[in-house]
Image: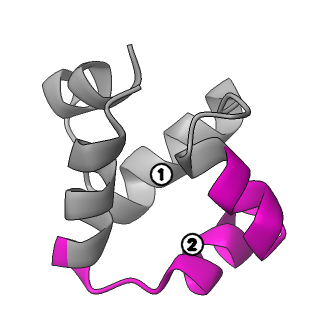
Amino acid sequence: MNRELLVRKIDAAGIKYYKMAAELGLSRTGFALKLRGENDFKMGEITKICSILKLNAAERDEIFF
C-alpha cells in the first residue's frame, strides 16, 4: 500500500481521519492500524475509500495494489 499517496488524497479532500474511519465502519484505532499498514484494507473498504475520494482505477491501483 502507498500510504503517503493515500494520506495526500485524504488531506487534499479535506476529510478528517475520524470521519473517514466512521464512513468505513471502523474505529479511529482500526483505521490508523490500516493506514500504517499493520492491518490490510478489505475490498469493501477500498471500494468505499475510492468512492469517498473519487479515485479512478489507476489511482486505486497505485495506492492499494
* Above or below, comparing residue 4 to residue 11 in the picture: above
* Above or below, comparing residue 1 to residue 24 in the picture: above
Q: Is residue 54 visible?
A: yes
Say whether disc 1 or disc 2 marks the residue closer to the N-terminus.
2
Nearest the viewer among 36 and 47 is 36
* Side of 52 where 14 appears, left or right: left
Displayed quadrant of residue 31: bottom right
Image coordinates of residue 65 in percent, x first then y, are: 38, 13
Displayed quadrant of residue 7: bottom left
* Side of 63 where 58 appears, left or right: left
**Residue 28 in magenta stretch:** yes
Which label is found at residue 20?
A: 2
The secondary structure that most of the magenta stretch takes on is helix
**Residue 23 in magenta stretch:** yes
Please name the residue shown 41% across and 25% down the image.
Answer: 1
Secondary structure category for the residue under label 2: helix
Task: Look at label 1 and name its amino acid.
Answer: Ile
Task: Look at label 2 and name its amino acid.
Answer: Met
Cα–Cα span, label 1 and label 2? 8 Å
Within 10 Å of the Cα at label 2, are there few (<14), some (14-19), or many (20+) other Cα atoms? some
Magenta range: 12-33
Marks 1 and 2 close (CB-CB < 8 Å): yes
Q: Which residue is mark 1?
A: 49
Image coordinates of residue 41 in percent, x first then y, are: 65, 33
